[in-house]
Amino acid sequence: MPSNPLSHATLFLLLLLLSTTLAKNHHSPAAGRHPHHAPKNATAVRLRQAYDALQSWKRVIYSDPRQLTSNWRGPDVCAYRGVYCAPHPNDTSITATVAGIDLNHGDLAGFLPESLGLLSDLALLHLNSNRFCGILPSSLANLSLLFELDLSNNRFVGPFPAVVLALPSLHFLDLRYNEFEGPVPPELFNNNKLDAIFINNNWLTSVIPASLGSSSASVVVFANNRFSGCLPPTIAKFADTLEELLLINSSISGCLPVELGFLYKLRVLDISQNDIVGPIPYSLAGLAHLEQLNLGHNRLSGTVPEGICALPNLANFTFSYNFLCEEEGICGNLTARGVAYDDRRNCLPEKPRQRSEKECEAEKPVECFEGECGGREIHDGVSVSATSPPPS
Ligand SMILES: *[C@@H]1O[C@H](CO)[C@@H](O)[C@H](O)[C@H]1NC(C)=O
Ligand SMILES: *[C@@H]1O[C@H](CO)[C@@H](O)[C@H](O)[C@H]1NC(C)=O
Ligand SMILES: *[C@@H]1O[C@H](CO)[C@@H](O)[C@H](O)[C@H]1NC(C)=O
Ligand SMILES: *[C@@H]1O[C@H](CO)[C@@H](O)[C@H](O)[C@H]1NC(C)=O
Ligand SMILES: *[C@@H]1O[C@H](CO)[C@@H](O)[C@H](O)[C@H]1NC(C)=O
Ligand SMILES: *[C@@H]1O[C@H](CO)[C@@H](O)[C@H](O)[C@H]1NC(C)=O
C-alpha cells in the first residue's frame, strides 16, 4: 500500500511554513489600500465558498464506512474532520481559509465534483487510499496555491489528467495506483517546480518522451506501466536534481544511454524487469552517490564494469537474470566489499546458479551506438536492428 512520505504530523508544520514563505515572497498591495473594493469580510466569503464546496462533495461521497465526513455539518468548515484551515499566505485580510484536506486511508467512495475549484486556497490535498473514481474536474486548475496533490491508490480513470499541468505551485504529484491510461504528456517533464513525480502502477503507454526538458524532479517513479521504446539520452536533463529513478517493469527496450551516468545525484536506480539489451555503460561508474542499483531481469550482456563495483556508497547491486559473461576485478567478490548482490542466472563461467551454456550461446550479442537507442544484434558480423526479427 503506498503511503505518503509526508506524515500526518508534518502536515501542520508544512502548512505553517508554506504560509510564512509565501507571505514573505508576496506582499499583498491590495490589502487595506482599497477597502471599498474588497468584500466586507473576506474571511467569511472564503469560508462560505469552502462550505459550498465541501457540502456538494459530501453529496457525491456514496460510501463512508469510517464515518469520516459525519461531522461535515454546519458553517464551521475548519472543524470538519480532515479539513485544515490557515491564514491566507498572500492576503492578510483572509485570516482563515481551507488550506489542507487530508483524507488518507479513508476508504471513501465517490467522485470529485467541479465545485472543488471553490477551494482556491488549498495547499495540500491528500486522498491516498480511497475509492474515488471518475476523472479529475477541470476546476482544479483554480487551485493556484496547491503544493501537494496525492491521489494515489484510488480508481481514477481516463487520460493523464492534464489539469495537474496547469497548477502553478505544484511540487509533489502522486498519481500512482490508479487507472490512468494513454500517453504521458511531455509537459510533465518540462516543469521546473515539480520535485516528486509518482505515476507508477497505472495503464500509461507511449514512450518516455525524448523531448525531456529541464526538470527539477528529485524523485521520478514510472514503474509498472506499459511504456515502450527506450530510455532517451535526454534523461541527462534531470542531472541536477534526480536522486531516485524507478523504471521497474515498464516495457523499456533498447540500450541504456551513456547519459544515465550523468545523473550524478542518483542514490537509487532500478530499471529491473524490462527488455534492455547491450552492455552496462561504463559511465555508471560516475554515480558517486549510488546506493541501490538494480539491473535484474533484462537482457544485458558483456562485462560488469569494475568502476561500478567500486562505487563508494554502493550497498546493493542486483544484476541477476541477464546474459552478463564477465565480472571485472572486485565485481567477482562483492562480499569482500560488504555489498549485497545478486548475480544469479547470467553467463558467468566461475559462478554457481548460472544459465546453461546452450541458453548463453543462443543469446546474440548486441552493439549499441551513441545517440541511437535501438541497439543492433550482430549476426555473422552483420548488424541487425534488435527490435526487428532476426533474418532466418
Ligand atoms: C469575519 O468572519 C469571520 C468568520 O466568519 C469571523 O470570525 C470574524 O470575526 C469576522 N470579522 C469581522 C471583522 O467581522
Ligand atoms: C499574491 O498577491 C499578488 C497581488 O494580489 C499577486 O500578484 C500574486 O500573484 C499573489 N501570489 C500568489 C502566490 O498567489
Ligand atoms: C476560483 O476561485 C475564485 C476565488 O476563490 C472563486 O471566486 C471562483 O469561483 C473559483 N472558480 C471556480 C471555477 O471554482
Ligand atoms: C508488470 O506490469 C504489467 C503491466 O502494467 C502488470 O500487468 C504486471 O503485473 C507487472 N508485473 C509485476 C511483476 O509487477
Ligand atoms: C537488494 O536489492 C534487491 C532488489 O531491489 C532486493 O530484493 C534485496 O532484498 C536487497 N538486498 C538487501 C540485503 O537489501
Ligand atoms: C571474497 O573475499 C573474502 C574476504 O576478502 C574472502 O574471504 C573470500 O574467500 C573471497 N571469495 C572468493 C570467492 O574469492
Image: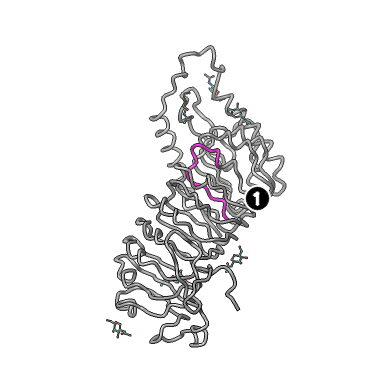
Above/below status of 4 relative to 331: above
Q: Which residues are magenta?
A: 165-176
Task: Please tell me how many numbered marks the rendered image carries.
Answer: 1
* Closest to the observer, 311 or 302: 302
Alpha-carbon neighbours of circle 1 within 10 Å: few (<14), some, or many (≥20)?
many
Mark 1 lies on a secondary structure that is: strand
Mark 1 sits near ligand 4, with its Cβ under 8 Å away:
no
Quadrant field for ligand 1: top right
Residue beneath the point at 48% across and 62% down: 373
Does the magenta run of residues contain 272? Answer: no
Quadrant location, the C terminus:
bottom right
Where residue 25 sits in the image (x, y, percent)?
39, 30
Three-letter code for the amino acid on which mark 1 is drawn: Phe
Where residue 380 sits in the image (x, y, percent)?
49, 79
Above/below status of 315 relative to 183: below
Where residue 66 sits in the image (x, y, percent)?
64, 51
Q: How is the image coloured?
A: one colour
Residue beneath the point at 49% across and 74% down: 382
Where residue 54 sits in the image (x, y, percent)?
64, 36
Quadrant location, the N terminus:
bottom right
On the image, numbered disc 1 is attached to which residue?
156
